[in-house]
Amino acid sequence: MPDIRIQREHQLGLAKARKVALAWAEEVERQLSMECTVIEGEFSDTVEFVRSGVKGSLIVAADHFDLQAKLGFLLGAFSKTIEAEITKRLDAMLLAGTSAKPAATKAAATKPSSAKKPAPKKKAG
């Protein structure tokens, strides 16, 4: 059973939902040092994310997002705080409905280009 499960319905359609998911993956890679892999499918995509102490996936469909994450022992004590932060970021991006970066990432955009991390890896699926 996952430690964190967040489900959100939306009306974006798959193309816009993919853009939101990609922007979310880029943000968590940059700000939380996650390694993300995007697995594209015909009717939905999966964004797998991992880092020390966290492993999970975000299912991206035309009408919903379903995020599940398993936390390691040390991070498990902070599951409610982590869930609240993930929920806040995901909801803000869904509300925007585009790949526009949230205000918190504007500071990151001012860093030299050598500090930018590459976009998440994509796998055909």
Image: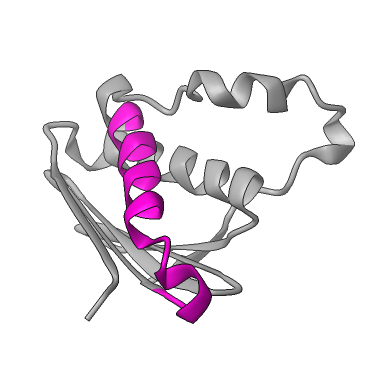
- Identify the residue at image location x=32%, y=45%: 84
Q: Name the main secondary structure of what is drawn in magenta.
A: helix
Residue 91 located left or right of residue 71: left
Instruction: Locate residue 81, reporting x and y percent.
Output: 38, 50
Q: Nearer the viewer, residue 36 or 43?
A: 36
Which corner quadrant of the image does residue 44 belong to?
Answer: bottom left
Image label count: 0
Q: Height in image: 5 above or below 103? A: below
Q: Is residue 49 inside the magenta stretch?
A: no
Q: Is residue 84 inside the magenta stretch?
A: yes
Q: Height in image: 16 above or below 29? A: above
* Colour convention: one colour
Q: Nearer the viewer, residue 110 or 73?
A: 73
- Identify the residue at image location x=62%, y=44%: 31
Q: Height in image: 39 above or below 103? A: below
The C terminus appears in which quarter of the rendering?
A: bottom left
The N terminus appears in which quarter of the rendering?
A: bottom left
Instruction: Locate residue 21, reporting x and y percent.
Output: 38, 44
- Identify the residue at image location x=47%, y=78%: 72
- Identify the residue at image location x=59%, y=59%: 34
Q: Nearer the viewer, residue 41 or 111?
A: 111
Q: What range is drawn magenta here? A: 71-93
Instruction: Locate residue 103, reporting x and y percent.
Output: 52, 18
